[in-house]
Image (cartoon, rainbow, N blue to C red):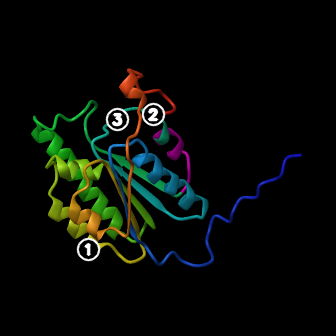
């Protein structure tokens, strides 16, 4: 016999007031997935979400397709199709990251969102596409009622120190090591 699952009320009776800073980093898979899991949970409780994708361009990620159909979530994607070469950063890559950070700052300070996700911001900082001090300032200026999630490998020690929750994804084994390429619907 199947149990009927009831949906939570889309609007919470009490306002969201205690926003923290979460950081997902490490060489293991799952940083964006963890952030998006939190997004789904937040949307299920009627919270308003903004996601800024750093360095992910217009690649056809499955999560964008489904999230774009849901209420209370907005997204902005920056970067070019293809991967950034950290040894050969192009001016247009820096400009895209700068625009992404400006968009993230605007969303965070706007009072329009309860949760703001900065996907791959850690790697943008590590590769000097944006300045660490600008991200630190965004965190220090964050209103107390906004939850902020930062993802990406290579999180700077200052960002780790500022975060309230830090999770490091550790790679123990990965299909890429066996030559298995990314799989539509699972990896993107």
The correct choice, above or below, for 135 with respect to 186 in the image is: below
Q: Residue 133 at x, y = what percent? A: 15, 64
Q: Quote the CA–CA distance across marks 1 and 3.
A: 30 Å
The correct choice, above or below, for 169 with respect to 93 in the image is: below
Can you tell which quarter of the image residue 8 is in? bottom right
Q: Earlier in the sequence, mark 2 or mark 3?
A: 3
Residue on which disc 1 sits: 140
Q: Residue 114 at x, y = what percent? A: 45, 67
Residue on which disc 2 sits: 187
Q: Earlier in the sequence, mark 2 or mark 1?
A: 1
The correct choice, above or below, for 182 with respect to 78 in the image is: above
Q: Residue 85 at x, y = what percent? A: 17, 34
* Position of residue 130 in the picture relative to residue 63 (left or right): left
Residue on which disc 3 sits: 58
* The C terminus sits in image quarter: top left
User: Which one is in front in this view, the residue at disc 2 or the one at disc 3?
Assistant: 2
Q: Which span is picked out in magenta? A: 64-71
Q: Earlier in the sequence, mark 1 or mark 3?
A: 3
């Amino acid at each position: 016999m199947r149990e009927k699952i009831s949906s939570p009320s889309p609007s919470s009776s009490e306002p969201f007031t205690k926003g923290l800073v979460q950081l997902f980093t490490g060489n293991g898979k799952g940083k964006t997935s963890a952030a998006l899991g939190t997004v789904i949970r937040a949307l299920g409780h009627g919270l308003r979400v903004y996601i800024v994708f750093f360095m992910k361009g217009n690649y056809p990620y499955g999560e964008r397709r489904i999230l774009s159909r849901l209420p209370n979530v907005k997204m902005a994607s920056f970067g070019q199709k293809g991967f950034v070469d950290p040894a050969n950063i192009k001016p247009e890559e820096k400009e895209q990251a700068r625009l992404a950070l400006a968009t993230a700052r605007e969303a965070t300070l706007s009072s329009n969102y309860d949760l703001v996700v900065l996907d791959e911001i850690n790697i943008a900082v590590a590769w000097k596409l944006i300045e660490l001090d600008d991200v630190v300032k965004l965190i220090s200026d964050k209103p107390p009622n906004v939850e902020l999630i930062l993802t990406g490998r290579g999180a700077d020690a200052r960002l780790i120190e500022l975060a309230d929750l830090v999770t490091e994804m550790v790679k123990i084994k990965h299909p890429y090591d066996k030559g298995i390429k990314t799989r539509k619907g699972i990896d993107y």
